[in-house]
Image (spheres, rainbow, N blue to C red):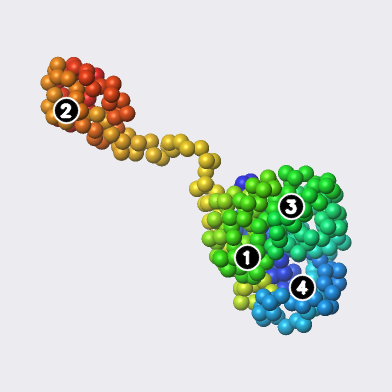
Amino acid sequence: MSSSVIVIAEVGVNHNGSIEQAQRLIEIASMAGADYVKFQSFQADLLASPQADLATYQKESSVNFDSQLAMLKEYELSNEDHLVLKEFCLEKDIGYLSSAFDQVSLDFLRSQGLKSFKVPSGEITNYPYLKFLGSFNAEIFISTGMSTMDEISDAVEVLTAAGTNKKDITVLHCNTQYPTELEDANLRAIQTIEKELCIKVGFSDHTLGSMASIIAVSLGASVIEKHITLDSSQAGPDHKASMEPSEFIKYVQGIREAEIALGDGVKRVTNSECDNRLLVRKSLVAAVDILEGDTFTSENIAVKRPGTGISPMNINSVLGLKANRNFRKNEPIQV
């Protein structure tokens, strides 16, 4: 957790109901250097009614379910499963997170001592849920897919009114289409959210590849979330928009390199360019042979590399003076 940008490896339901597969994904996230690995906590019967249809991307993901409820029941993890995964995260030295989709699940996560909570995009208008979570006075990451600025602002207000300190809330810009096309990523919204709400911002990235996340870091995102999978060709709603292990390892490395490259924003001469400063800048030199007693003029003074002598910034203090000795052509001027 020492890095300034928090990287969340989103497993979601990509475990396909297998604890062993979930544990393997935890190992990969830890090995890659992510700060958290995140799952989903829900009770299917509390999350969706039998009438709730599948989203288009879910219908196209090689799963044969006739409703959201049927799909959710397939991927639902028990409380006992979550306890096993939380303990395994501890063993692998990576933080455990889970997006809770109902108040019962929120309460369970709180009972397990969690200090950080993730609000999924679909709950941003669920005020009873937000009010309950806000009373925890915990760190909150809130996704904002499908949301307007007014809805985001109102959700933050509900959380803070319930007791959460605004400084403990990070608003994650995202798009809920899996995968998200770059034309729909709208990354400048990260800066809009930060400016209008005066709040910490991040990016839940559902695009393919790493470019959008690296751009998001450059725009001020302090939290980045990315889906991971063991195999993107697996059947399941999110695999196609998820990164496989080797790609995710490179992805986290890219985020860390972006952090380093951004620096602290203070313009200064770096240690690595001190030598170049002297070699590439210029000094005043004799344009021709100059005799002792000659007057320095713009005709007998030239400006050439290296920059080890009198800087051309100070030429006006030299012009008009008398040479105190002879200077050969190209010899640095001294006064």
> How far is the residue under mark 2 from the one under mark 1?
65 Å
| Three-letter amino acid code of the residue under disc 2 | Asn
The quarter of the image holding the C terminus is: top left
Q: Is residue 3 above or below residue 19?
A: above
x and y, in percent, of residue 87 in the image: 76, 58
Name which of mark 2 and mark 1 comes first in the sequence.
Answer: 1
| Three-letter amino acid code of the residue under disc 4 | Tyr
Name which of mark 1 and mark 3 comes first in the sequence.
Answer: 3
Name which of mark 4 and mark 3 comes first in the sequence.
Answer: 4
> How far is the residue under mark 2 from the one under mark 3?
68 Å
> How far is the residue under mark 2 from the one under mark 4?
83 Å
Provide the residue designation for mark 4: 75
Write down the quadrant of residue 15 in the picture.
bottom right
Provide the residue designation for mark 1: 206
Instruction: Judge depth for marks 2 and 1 and give the one in front.
Output: 2
| Three-letter amino acid code of the residue under disc 3 | Ser
Provide the residue designation for mark 2: 300
Q: Tell me, yes or no, whether the two marked residues, 2 and 1, touch with CB atoms within 8 Å.
A: no
Relative to residue 241, is residue 147 drawn left or right?
right
Q: Identify the residue at horizontal 84%, vertical 78% (top origin).
A: 50
Q: Identify the residue at horizontal 64%, vertical 47% (top origin).
A: 195
